[in-house]
Amino acid sequence: MLNIKLFKNSDGAANFRSIHVRILESEGAQIYVMKDEPNECEAGLVNSEDNIVQFEFEPGDAAVSSAALPAGQTWCDFSAPVLAEANKKLGWTK
């Protein structure tokens, strides 16, 4: 399952920038990871005008098994290219 939310909120943007598990860099995108599990990912993209796209990935067991993530890799690592592509489509790539 994938939920996507797009909104503008300066407090929310500040939270993404300061309260995150880690930041992934992929193809010019800064991806703020909020929840980082092998089978779950909550991450967001934030632009300079405090617009936010929030992604919540909850793949099923079959998807997780099929992805065969290497040890130490999470669903956010696996999803980073998709999030970077969304960043490009929005025109937010630096």
Image (cartoon, rainbow, N blue to C red):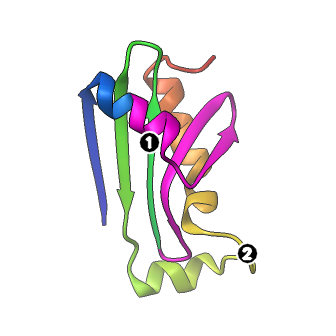
Position of 49 relative to 70 (above/below): above
- Where residue 74 appears, as percent x and y from the top left, is 61, 69
Residue 44 numbered mark, or none: 1
The C terminus appears in which quarter of the rendering?
Answer: top right
Chain-order first, disc 2 or disc 1: 1
Q: Is 81 on the left or on the right of 41, as rendered? A: right
Position of 32 relative to 70 (above/below): above
Q: Is residue 16 magenta?
A: yes
Q: Are marks 2 and 1 in contact (CB under 8 Å)?
A: no
Q: Residue at x 56, y 41 (%)?
A: 31
**Image label count:** 2
Residue 16 numbered mark, or none: none
- Where residue 19 appears, as percent x and y from the top left, is 48, 45
Q: Residue furthest right?
A: 71
Q: Residue at x 52, y 49 (%)?
A: 20
Position of 23 relative to 13 (above/below): below
Q: Secondary structure at mark 1?
A: strand
- Where residue 65 appears, as percent x and y from the top left, is 55, 86
The N terminus appears in which quarter of the rendering?
Answer: bottom left
Position of 71 relative to 2 (above/below): below
Q: Residue at x 47, y 14 (%)?
A: 48
Residue topped by disc 2: 72
Q: Is 42 on the left or on the right of 22, as rendered? A: left
Q: Write down the region rendered in magenta.
A: 14-39
Q: Is residue 22 magenta?
A: yes
Q: Quadrant of residue 52?
A: top left
The residue type indicated by label 2 comes to: Gly
The residue type indicated by label 1 comes to: Gly
